[in-house]
Image (cartoon, rainbow, N blue to C red):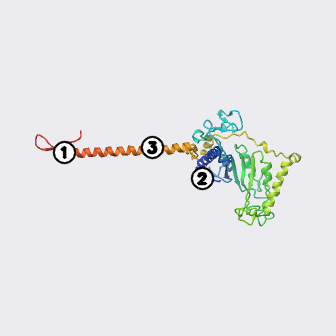
Amino acid sequence: NEVMNDEKAWKAAPCVRAYARDLKLYMARMVEEGVLERTLPLMYAGQDSSMIGGADTDPNEVMKLTVDYLSCVEYGKSVVVVDSEEDVDVGSVSKQVALRASGSAGGGSWNFEDHKFGESPIDIFGLNVESWCSSTQTFEYNSDGTIGTYYSLWKALKKSSVPIIFSEMGCPHSHFDRDDLERKTKEGTRDWKQVEVVSRDMADSWSGFVAYTYDGPEDFVMFKGGPWDGQHVLEPTKDFENFRKELAKVTLLEDGAEEAGIRNDYSSVDSKFLPRQCSDVESELMGLGVRLFNDDEIRSYAMTEDSHYFRRTGNLFWIMVFILVGGFTLVMRRNRRARKIGYESVPSHGNDGYPMMAGVA
């Protein structure tokens, strides 16, 4: 959640990929052993205001690169799992295709050493967004007449290879309608008009949202009586009632889209966009001043039991070899020193009667 927020923090990006990779490998191992019934989808949540490359860089471009980096694969090295029985060509690059249903996407122990890069590290990309802070805002335009925040995000991320959601959606109470004294309420009650926008105008590429928040920071809460103790239901506020009203409109859209003449077909989400090549994404990031090491070089901690056994026994073997070699070397040095001292202490006399020392030739 919100790791790569600036250029300095982006240095940790390969670790995020490696961590997601190991979580997937570990879950796959647990499924094989019967500990888990299935693997769980992994989501990374990014901050809408993440910045790299200087003030001239479009934040939406940064967000797109974040999605691409966390979902990229290295064609020619990886096994890409897609819902197709055909080999897929992207440009001049031929990719290997494996079916989840047939179990040919690796199988066995899912040891990372055999499946470098493997599938996309993340399954879902979440975006924490605090915009939509005006009752006069629309999908296309902000209240000040600039291009709408939601429209810009939709346009930038519509060709992503993984599902996109708003993992935190909602303007701070203190910011909502703050420049419109006629509409602003004391509590900063939000209208939640963006619910219909995400569910209708962005439905071709966005998969949902999470309203922020049931309980938490006071500037975002939709219920009163907190903090929540995990048992008793909190009391809803006008803010929540507005959200529920907008959510009901979404249900009506789904039930009566044809009668209303509104196209709201969630099945139309385009699934033909496949993950980008990691080297291409890394080249773009380098152009913005972000130089990353290859996460493939990070050793996987999601190893099989056989791998752990080999590692333990292998380490023990080399420890024993080191002890034996070290002990033998020490004994040899002591013997050589003893012989040298012996030679130097034996006197000998030459023909001239003077003593002479015997040495080692």
Q: Which amino acid does the dot numbered 3 rest on?
A: Trp
Q: Which mark is residue 9?
A: 2
How many circles with numbers are drawn on the protein? 3
Spatial distance from mark 1 to mark 2, Cα to Cα?
72 Å
Whether residue 330 is visible to the viewer of this picture, yes or no, is: yes
Q: Between disc 2 and disc 3, whose residue precedes?
A: 2
Q: Is residue 149 above or below residue 87?
A: below
| Residue 273 placement: quadrant | top right
* SS label for mark 2: helix
* SS label for mark 3: helix
Spatial distance from mark 2 to mark 3, Cα to Cα?
38 Å
In this orientation, which residue lies closer to the viewer: 222 or 24? 24
Residue farthest to the front? 34
Identify the image quadrant of the C terminus: top left
Q: Which amino acid does the dot numbered 2 rest on?
A: Ala
| Residue 346 placement: quadrant | top left
Q: Between disc 1 and disc 2, whose residue precedes?
A: 2
Residue at x 73%, y 40% (from the top left corner): 271
Q: Which mark is residue 318?
A: 3
Say few, some or many: other residues with alpha carbon within 10 Å of mark 1 (under 14 / 14 to 19 / 20 or more).
few
Q: Position of residue 272 (x, y in %)?
A: 72, 39
Residue farthest to the left? 352
Q: Which amino acid does the dot numbered 1 rest on?
A: Val
Q: Which residue is mark 1?
A: 346
In this orientation, which residue lies closer to the viewer: 271 or 277? 271
